[in-house]
Amino acid sequence: MSGAERFEAHDDHEGYDGPPYEDGGHGNEGGGAGPGGPKGPDGTGGDGRAPGPPPRIPPPRAAVEDSGLPLPELEPEADGVALAPLVLSHDVLRSLLGAWALAACSAAETAAVEEHLGRCGACADEALRLRGAVGLLQRPENLDLDPGLRTRVLENCLDRRPPRIPVPEWAAPYDAESARLDALLQDIGDSEWHAPVRLRWFEDGAARNRRTTVAGVIAHLLSVDGLVAVALGLDDPLGLTGGESVVGPAARTEAYWRASHFPPTRTVRRPWREQSHHLVRTASFTGSGAGRLAVSYGDFELPLHDAMLDRAFEIWVHAEDIAEAVDYPYEPPSPRHLHGMIDLAARMLPSALAARRQAGLASPLPPRHLVPAGGPGRSLRLEIEGSGGGEWLIPLDSPGAMGSAAREVAHVALDDVEFCRLAAGHVSPQEAAAGQDGDREAIRDVLFAAAALSRM
């Protein structure tokens, strides 16, 4: 039987014994009064029975297009015909600001909100903030600040904003490096002041180290910077009077640590910071002539302009130690300051080489190589690559000899930061990434002399 024939059988109820219909009967017998069947003139079904209850499931609603009635006319939207503006209360308009910032309002709502913003300053400020927040939400990149942002801002400020009292050129590296370290200390938490740090240096042909904390490193810098403070007539952080003997950097540090009743804490930052400010201020007021003032390190002396450069180098090296301990990025000094530090190390190499030779740690000098002070002698060309680099001729025969390109016997090339880490004792001479050419013995002596410049 086809589908049409089955429907006809159901309509005529031939052989149908299924469940009753929704209206309780067995269908619309004879086209009676089902939900959609014809009705008689008295409102009953065509067979005289009363209509049944409405169906549980509403029938489909007829579309207006199928009713035969005319379609309603739409509002004209021709050009130049303005729609009636929405009249909304202040509270409603304020609640629409978020949707407006996300461009989720209708055209009429957008017009009403924007008209309101021209009259209400409070809502205009709120809308501006919401628009800014939407811009942040749509950014694809990470919202975390760049860890190197503070360093770049400081460098930019130090390069562009001159101080009221000009800082001497020889004191500028110390001023810059102490400011960078102070900015790093500002960012670390209380617990990080007790993070372990190892002070590393090279002594007697071997690597040395001393365990301390971040606060202990600042105490070390405070005590050694006191050598410069004493030379400038400032207070000694150790409390030593003028009649007492001046001791070296390592002994001063150990004395400061022993004098503390408790291990150093973050409170040491304040005296170190104040002392660094006093050093720069005093050097600035004293003038350029103060740069020739001698600063005693115990076993040797440096003029003040070299001592300030030496202290800037130490601050940078130990700031990197601190940054490594607290897992914080830290950049090398500016190229011109880095070049000055390398130049100081290169100028100190002949004396360091002579001291190692006297101690029997370097190859002996044959008698025929002895030269008078100021005369040309055998030389090693030290080539430092990078933005802070350059070239230096290192005399090998005597600290008083002059470097001579005509008597060059060896050539060493290193990266600028690599050379500084060698001079700081953070890289051993055997591990230094150095390009070498010429007299191997002379090269070895100079690399070991560079490492010997380091100290605690």
Image (spheres, grey):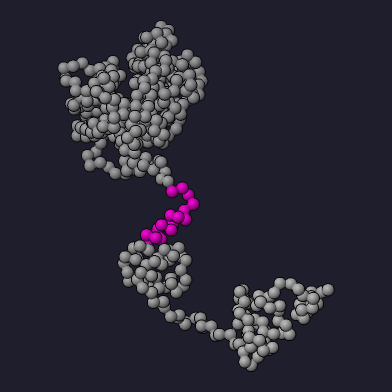
Q: Name the residue furthest bottom.
A: 41
Image coords of residue 71 (percent x, y): 58, 85
Does residue 185 sit above or below 11 in this rendering? Answer: above
Does residue 9 sit above or below 144 in this rendering? Answer: below
Looking at the rendering, which quadrant does residue 95 occupy?
bottom left
Q: Name the residue furthest right.
A: 1
Say which residue appears at 45% left-offset and 80% top-offset: 83
Image coords of residue 404 (percent x, y): 41, 20
Q: Is residue 407 magenta?
A: no
Say which residue appears at 63% left-offset and 88% top-offset: 44
Q: Nearer the viewer, residue 434 or 365?
A: 434
Does residue 187 sit above or below 303 in this rendering? Answer: below
Q: Nearer the viewer, residue 392 or 308?
A: 308
Q: How many marks?
A: 0
- The reply to whether residue 293 is in sight is no
Looking at the rendering, which quadrant does residue 208 occupy?
top left
Magenta stretch, overall SS: helix
Image coords of residue 216 (percent x, y): 31, 26
Q: Is residue 133 magenta?
A: yes
Q: Nearer the viewer, residue 25 or 427?
A: 25
Q: Which residues are magenta?
A: 128-143
